[in-house]
Image: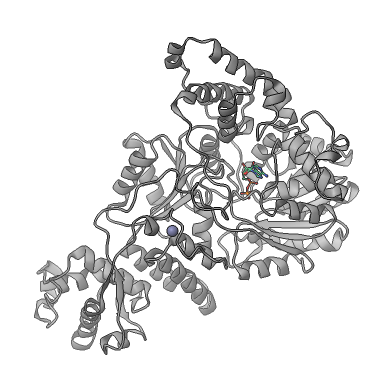
Amino acid sequence: MGVTGGISEMPQVTEGPGTADSEALATLHRVFGYEAFRGEQQAIIEHVVAGGDALVLMPTGGGKSLCYQIPALVRPGTGVVISPLIALMQDQVDALRALGVRAGFVNSTQDFDERRMVEAEFLAGELDLLYLAPERLRLDATQDLLSRGKISVFAIDEAHCVSQWGHDFRPDYLTLSLLGERWPDVPRIALTATATRATHEEITQRLNLPAARHFVASFDRPNIQYRIVPKADPKKQLLAFLREEHAGDAGIVYCLSRNSVERTAEFLTANGIEAVPYHAGLDAGTRAAHQSRFLREDGLVVVATIAFGMGIDKPDVRFVAHLDLPKSIEGYYQETGRAGRDGLPSTAWMAYGLNDVIQQRKLIQSGEGDEAFRRRAAAHLDAMLALCETAQCRRGQLLAYFGQDPDAAGCGNCDTCLTPPETWDGTIAAQKVLSTVVRLQRERGQKFGAIQIVDILLGKRTGKVIQFDHDQLSVFGIGQDLTEGEWRGAIRQLLAQGLLAVEGEYGTLGLTEASGSVLRREREVPLRKEPKKPAATRQRSAGASAGSGKAKAAAVELPDELLPAFEALRAWRAEQAREQGVPAYVIFHDATLREIVTRRPGSVRDLGTVNGVGEKKLATYGEGVLQVLASLDGAAPAAADDTPDADWPEPADEPEPDDWI
Ligand code: ADP
Ligand code: ZN
């Protein structure tokens, strides 16, 4: 790897005939310290370097950033990156500067002088990359500024924000269609982790990218284990999951409401797990401080609404937990995709129950929007429910949703593959539920929710049953063959299958068009058995063994004898990070530290061949790393016990104003 050679001195490492790809590869080695491109990166970069427009669909963690950063470095001029993530721009720029890339940003968090300085750098041609919020681009002053400088490429990050149907819609993205008109010669690359065909088409059309080449990467994230468990006592289940499988790990817990975010964060903290809340109801300063802590500290849990997470590129998020049902598979996949960007084993865990279905169906019915909007929301929910209720491989179902062929044999790293669920013939149970609904309606003109239906089936004489004389119904007590949990599971599945409906603001149960065929015994209703105990615990290496066609996954666990060196390097890294006020992963990723302790480079030159060690980092940290390794070699074996704890930087206190919510 050419850690010392300049771009022009390295033609021998190239494979292709053109200079564009040789420069791209040389830049990958020299600046980023990576050995090879991943998946589609090379094709995308070559296309953009040659001046083509591109639409890039890659899952979170797939490696989108390089797809515009390298063209920006290789082509003359400054790459302009449009990103909605103002609160993260400082970190992104810091990370690039640590690589020796001349990067800057212009946004509302800066004062006049800071902004002027960046603008002057841009005009002088001294910036490789300039980050801009979309709302700035609308300003004439910004457009004039851009016209006076030289632009190498426009990168439109989080391009799905232009989609009016998505939950991340940003009206300012609509103005981005002007880029092509005003700068017809500058290539544009739009990137997103949202993958449905409808979204591709919307992005192409709204960003005015008719000639863009589409690059659709595999959406598989083999190192993430997907699990969906039946919800009983969600906070307790979460606590057990964290204690048993993710003690001390960083992760994100998603809840639907601000209230449950607050309560869950308090609950975790009271139980010894450090957790902070994040939602749009908190003031900007608190939100920024919590986000900053999450990025900078090790092992912090953020409990959040969907307001949190877009653009968070922390590589070592070990789990993403959902305590409430996401509204769509797109949302679920983006949120869970925030786990394991470093390729190490991670878990996407969700607790899901009957109330989730009722609540979401109610939300759609009582929510804003016209009939078309509701239909779309209902279709999204149906797909999400199908994922929750499937007895097949979850990953297979996810990939199929994104138009990709799943592995017919299953993935081996999701709950249904690890512990295949049993199914049972629920036809009679379904008839009992539906008959109860029919009788209440026909004989009494009443509608009730799931709780009352289950009480009637079980023959429970509760206050409400007696009050309404429901013990006089012929269906009273006909369901004593199943438990309450089983009835709730059956109702949930009937709702998910569209055989039962949720109605009105109270969420009462009613029939659907399909209900009749069950009542008339024209169809069978297979149901999934409610597992007695939660499915499979994590199998750490499962992702790694997932087969050849999959993306490179989990690194192997470190053997015990290498741990002291790893911990010593982490402690050293923490000190560097604290001194510079940047997240630890900006210095080196865990994966890079792992490779260093495994290979034990003896010289600066050797160290330069480690993945993730580029020219600038080698120059800045090379000696320091070698010193840490040397001090370990000199130490007596017993000293291993004294290895300093990986001590993490104090949270940086500067508030990062955050106006993107
Ligand atoms: P995305 O933006 O698609 O979510 P990133 O661009 O943040 O993904 O990349 C995810 C991780 O993979 C980052 O830590 C990045 O440094 C790493 N990465 C990307 N491309 C390569 C590569 N060619 N070789 C090694 N690591 C890579
Ligand atoms: Zn599977």
- When asked about the image quadrant of residue 206, the answer is bottom right
> Height in image: 593 above or below 419?
above
Task: Depth check: give the residue in front, 348 or 285.
Answer: 348
Using the image, determine if residue 559 lies above or below residue 120. Answer: above
Whether residue 112 is visible here, answered yes or no, is: no
581 or 112, nearer to the observer: 581
Q: Where is ligand 1, by quadrant?
A: top right
Based on the displayed image, in which of its 4 quarters is residue 125 positioned?
Answer: top right
Residue at screen point 76% across, 38% down: 103
Residue 155, given in percent of the width and then of the height, sits at: 75, 53
Instruction: Decide if residue 551 is on the left or right side of residue 72.
Output: left
Q: Quadrant where the N terminus lies?
A: top right
Q: Which residue lies at the image location 60% right of the left edge and 44% below the top edge? A: 658
Q: In the image, residue 499 lies at what x, y percent?
A: 34, 79
Residue 468: % across, % down? 14, 76
Seen in the picture, residue 533 relative to 131 is either above or below; the reply is below
**In the rendered picture of this protein, how many numbered marks are placed on residues?**
0
Front in this rendered view, residue 50 or 419: 419
Q: Nearer the viewer, residue 504 or 103?
A: 103
The quarter holding residue 507 reads bottom left
Asked if residue 12 lies left or right of residue 573, the reply is: right
